[in-house]
Amino acid sequence: MINPYEVLGVKEGTSKEDIKKAYRELAKKYHPDQYSDNPLKDLAEVKMRELNEAYDSLMKNNNSSSNGSYSNGSSNSYNSQSNYNSNSNDDYASNNIYQSVRMDLNSGNIPSAEQKLSSMNTKTAEWNFLMGMVHLKKGWHDSAYSFISRACSQEPNNIEYRRSFNELNNRTSNYRDNYYGRRGNDSGMGNLCLNLWCADTICECLGGDLISCC
Amino acid sequence: MFGYVTPCKMEMKIKDYEKFKAYYCGLCNSIKSNFGNLPRLTLNYDMTFLAILLDALCENKYNFNRFKCLIHPLKKRIMINNNEALDYAAFCNITLAYYKLMDDVYDNKTIKSKVFSVFLKGYLLKSEKTYTKRSYIDVIDYTKEKLLLLNTLEASHKDMGIDEHLSIDELSHVFADLTGFIISFYYKDAAFKDDLYWLGYNLGKWIYVIDAYDDLEKDIKSGSFNAINSLLNTDKLDFKNFSKCIKPRIDFLLATCAAQCLKHLNKLPLIKNENILYNILELGLMEKMDKVLNKDSNTYNLKGVEYKDDKSL
């Protein structure tokens, strides 16, 4: 097995954050999407695989042994690691799609975003959230609402989903207030006058007068 | 399906109300002079809104005219005439009314709609000659295509039964898109075309959904097609129970559409009619929603009821 620290170009014992940072930079550099019509594509794919393996093994190591040194990362865990790798490769691929979907959403390329999402099989919270965003942009508010609320129930602690869901609910309240606000005021005025008139009448019955002119 | 987009009269200034009536009479008159007397029966408020909106974006001045109306012979009335937006609205009014009637003929085959559609067809064909040079023929084709599509979707859905795959958004999209097309077609080369389209899209969806909800009780009783009932009533509940559980969802959808209409209206470079348009989209739509969704207390059918009550139009 190649030394994962070498692959990522960091020193042994580097903190988790720095490993992540190094991984992200290298992943950007070697990502096969950038070499689509390039003879280097195969090489980039190999590099990317190495990078993913190295990253996963380090992250796993860091989790299992708190001292974070590579010497503990023994080869007996290699089998389970390779399993783990194939899993997280899937995760990685879908994360990449989500990333490009977000980019499509930002640039307004809704059909492409929708196509990418509907070609996926796994429907995670993020998938539901992004699909909701796509439908929102299309003006399909009813289905957007159900997608985003599904994302919220799948990951109740995610701030992003929760915020969009609340936004959706609050969206109409200003609009409603404008109508009900006016209506409410009107009836309030009427009630005030009526109350005054009643009070005046009662006072007059008892011989006094609250409003002298009537 | 028509007659839901009306102003909230109680919150309107008298001058705006008079202007609205002048547009309404102008539309009626434009239908008369472009198509004939019989098609005037299809006149509706939604198309008055269309005329007011499209005219608001154009710089020419109001052309008021006093006239005597045959239906209301006692008082002199004011109308707006020689106005291209009104002519376009008149044309859309007839086109939509005709294809809607064709649907009805196809659906329930009543004699009334059949006879009427035959008459209307003659008028529409006659007008095609006058309008072709302004390429309004595109609108006719588009309307025909979309309403046919809507009809097939609704019909095929009836056979399929409850189908998870077709959502209310998907079904209403067809009519919403048609409305967006009709509204934005008039200014198809302008920079604000997209805003017009989205205003129309949301308004069309609003109309489709509120119409379905308004007819829900009647349709459940008679067993005829209703978008909300066939798409969302998976447990085949009766009206009372179903409306109770579906109301918040419909309410959300309608209010969102209406709020979106207002948002896109804000982006348009309006030159006149601002107060009328804001009144309709801000308060008029809410008022209708309030009445349709809380119908239990007032049971009559709502289309244009306010105006019939006080005989003002």
Image (cartoon, rainbow, N blue to C red):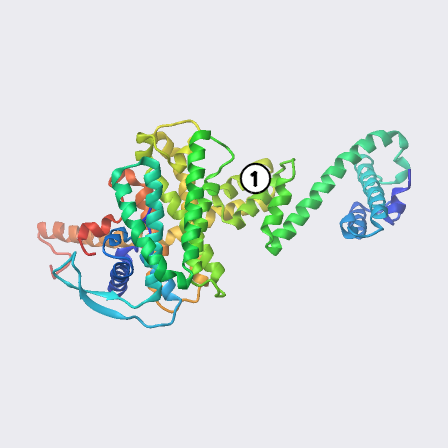
> In x, y percent, where is residue A18?
80, 49
Helix, strand or loop at mark 1: helix
**A113 up-or-down from A75: above or below:** below
Identified by mark 1, the residue type is Cys
Position of the C terminus of chain A by quadrant = bottom left
Q: Is residue B311 rendered to the left or right of residue B201?
A: left
Please state the total of marks drawn on the protein image: 1
Residue A72 seen: yes
Say which of B186 and B269 sits in front: B186
Left or right, B34 with reference to B154 = left
Q: Nearer the viewer, residue A20 or B111?
A: B111
Q: In percent of the image, x 71 and y 45: which residue is there?
A: A96
Q: Residue A73, located in which quarter of the rendered image?
A: top right
Q: Position of residue B171 (x, y in %)?
A: 45, 41
Q: Is residue A53 above or below residue B91?
A: above
Give me the chain letter of mark 1.
A
**Residue beneath the point at 19% across and 68% down:** B66
Q: Where is residue B89 drawn, in percent x and y?
A: 34, 59
Question: Badge 1 is on which residue?
Answer: A152
Residue A142, image x, y percentages: 47, 42
**Frontmost residue, B95 versus B58:** B95
B31 vs A108, nearest the viewer? B31
> What residue sits 16% from the left and 56% below the top?
B71
From this viewpoint, is residue B277 visible?
no
Quarter placement of the N terminus of chain A: top right
Other residues around mark 1 within 10 Å, as few (<14) / some (14–19) / many (≥20)? many
Q: Quadrant of residue B278?
A: bottom left
Residue B123: quadrant of the picture = bottom left
